[in-house]
Image (tube, coloured by chain):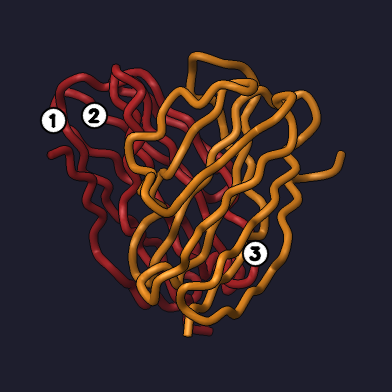
Chain colours: A orange, B red
Amino acid sequence: EAGVVQSPRYKIIEKKQPVAFWCNPISGHNTLYWYRQNLGQGPELLIRYENEEAVDDSQLPKDRFSAERLKGVDSTLKIQPAELGDSAVYLCASSAGTGTYNEQFFGPGTRLTVL
Amino acid sequence: ILNVEQSPQSLHVQEGDSTNFTCSFPSSNFYALHWYRWETAKSPEALFVMTLNGDEKKKGRISATLNTKEGYSYLYIKGSQPEDSATYLCAFIGSNYQLIWGAGTKLIIKP
């Protein structure tokens, strides 16, 4: 069974540039999570989808971050414009079912460096 | 503000020794606690999903206990091996489905 796929794995951009991350969850997983992880800290939930609906985006900085999950499968997370403080690892995870917190399966992450 | 704390932040253990570390979380509005292992250059991998007070779970040499009344969970590793070197993360899920991660315990096994 294929795991969670993320691309790109690494991205280096200059500040004020836009950037987008893509995630393909495990087939059949209804719930999808985007996390940001800074060095030495735990993952910070940015947004959680159940199917195509964003059910928790309270931690998403909406002035510059946006996300979509069209058709309830793949998801894209965008930052525009990027700031120096956005340098982090962006993780995507998925889990089976909705309305509950089952075991999450993580992708390899995208390491973003903003110069 | 809900807080999840893990201690210690890092831990060096001699190969063959047993060890344990702690995840502390809010004792109210508990729904579930997850433990994950994150090896360098790999994705986080789920170890345990714990939901009931008094839960004890085991996977090989690794086990975990849960005390929801006092708000803590212990992760134990028996007979540490080099492949156990990783960061161990816990995630607290509240009854309103709020999800909060600890910063992790970085475990280094010395051969």
Could you classify mark 1 by the number of other residues whose Cα lies within 10 Å: few (under 14), some (14-19), or many (20 or more)? few
Which type of secondary structure does the marked residue at label 3 adopt? loop
Give the labeled residue for mark 1.
Answer: B70
Q: Amino acid at mark 3?
A: Lys
The kind of residue on which mark 1 rests is Glu
> Is disc 3 on the same chain as disc 2?
yes
The chain ID associated with circle 1 is B
CB within 8 Å, label 3 to label 1: no
Residue A106 horizontal/vertical position (percent): 62, 47
Q: CA distance from mark 3 to mark 1?
A: 33 Å
Name the quadrant containing residue A59.
top left
In the drawing, does residue B7 fall left or right of residue B36? Answer: left
- Find residue A92 and report its horizontal and vertical position in percent: 60, 47
Q: Which residue is mark 2?
A: B67
Viewer-side residue, A59 vs A79: A79
Q: Residue at x 73, y 60 (%)?
A: A7
Disc 2 marks a residue whose amino acid type is: Asn
Q: Residue at x 40, y 34 (%)?
A: A57
The chain to which mark 2 is attached is B
- Establish if B82 lies above or below B105: below
SS of the residue under disc 1: loop
Residue B9, how many percent across, how many down? 27, 67
Dot in front, 2 or 3: 3
**What whole-number distance in Å separates the C-alpha atoms at marks 2 and 1?**
6 Å
